[in-house]
Image: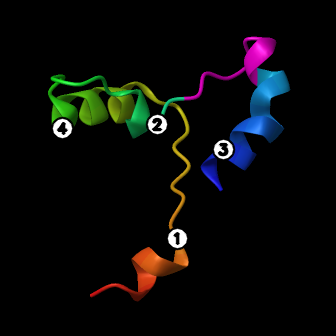
């Protein structure tokens, strides 16, 4: 679903209106919690995508 959303937002990204970031952009060896915290702190808008599987999990 995230990839499909990215496709829909690609025009805005090309125009420089938005910048997309997700946790898959964290490189190997990078401290992931800090990267996530820094990007959340810098964001003006955060869109959380939650799957049905995540909601169903204990």
Instruction: Name the residue carrying label 4.
Output: 33
Rendered residue at 43%/81% (across/down): 55
Q: Which mark is residue 51?
A: 1
Vertical comparison of 2 with 45: above or below? below
Mark 2 lies on residue? 22
Image label count: 4
In the rendered structure, does residue 14 fall within the stretch colored magenta? yes
Residue at 30% in and 23% down: 27
| Label 1 packing within 10 angstroms: few (<14), some (14-19), many (20+) | few
N-term mark: 4 or 2: 2
Per the image, label 2 sits on a secondary structure element best described as loop
Classify mark 4: helix, strand or loop.
helix
In the image, residue 17 above or below residue 58: above
Mark number, residue 3: 3
Quick one: label 2, few (<14), some, or many (20+) residues within 10 Å?
A: few
User: Does 31 lie within the magenta span?
Assistant: no
Does the residue at mark 2 contact the one at mark 3 (Cβ under 8 Å)?
A: no
Instruction: Determine crowd level at label 4: few under 14, some 14-19, many 20+ residues with C-alpha closer than 10 A.
Output: few
Q: Position of residue 56 (x, y in %)?
A: 42, 88
Q: Mark 2 against mark 3, which lies toward the viewer?
A: 3
Q: Is residue 26 left or right of residue 18?
A: left
Q: Is residue 51 left or right of residue 15?
A: left
């Amino acid at each position: 679903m995230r990839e499909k959303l990215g496709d829909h937002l690609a025009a805005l990204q090309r125009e420089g209106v938005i910048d997309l970031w997700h946790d898959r952009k964290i490189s190997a060896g990078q401290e992931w919690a800090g990267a996530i915290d820094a990007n959340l702190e810098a964001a003006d808008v955060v869109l959380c995508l939650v799957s049905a599987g995540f909601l169903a999990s204990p």
